[in-house]
Image: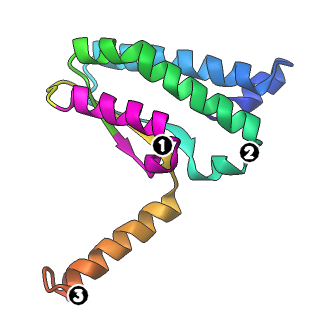
Amino acid sequence: MDGNGRWARQRFLPRIAGHRAGVETVRRITRHARTLGIEALTLYAFSSENWRRPAEEVSDLMGLLKHFIRADLNELVRDNVRLRVIGDYRRFSADVVALVDDAIARTAANTGPLLVIALNYGAQAELVSAARTLAARAASGEIAADAIT
């Protein structure tokens, strides 16, 4: 869904064509992973750095994300796939957040393979969040500071 601009450029296509091709690749990968018995698959869909892209491209990526969820959610439910999202997707528009929340809720009781989608995810933000969580737990006495390694 993201990271396909170079693919499109090499084929003299607009960037959105690369992103669309990426969505199709995601579909093929997730289906094939299930047939192979892969228990967990993490896919990077939207980096926190992607907000720096042109507004039209960000809008296109959000449109593809919405389309993917609407088109594929019933298949994920049917195939007993659990969906989890990492990253701060709540920064997205309300309609995208609602779709993601619904998809997570509809697959929460599933017991099959885990599909993790990284949305508005960045390693720096993840490290800052983890550090803050640990600091708060240490400050509250829940864990000892020297237990943090």
Q: Residue at x 55, y 41 (%)?
A: 46
Secondary structure, mark 2, is: loop
Mark 2 and mark 1: Cα distance apart in space: 15 Å
Secondary structure, mark 3, is: helix
Q: Residue furthest front?
A: 94
In the visual, does 25 lie left or right of 141?
A: right
Query: Residue 139 has which mark?
Result: 3
Q: Residue at x 39, y 67 (%)?
A: 129
The chosen color scheme is rainbow
Q: Which residues are magenta?
A: 85-108
| Image coordinates for residue 55, horizontal then vertical, percent | 74, 41
| Image coordinates for residue 18, horizontal then vertical, percent | 70, 22
Query: Residue 53 has which mark?
Result: 2
Residue 60 sits in which quadrant?
top right
**Which residue, given by chain and number where applicable, does mark 1 sit on?**
119
Upstream in sequence: badge 1 or badge 3: 1
Q: Residue at x 32, y 12 (%)?
A: 75
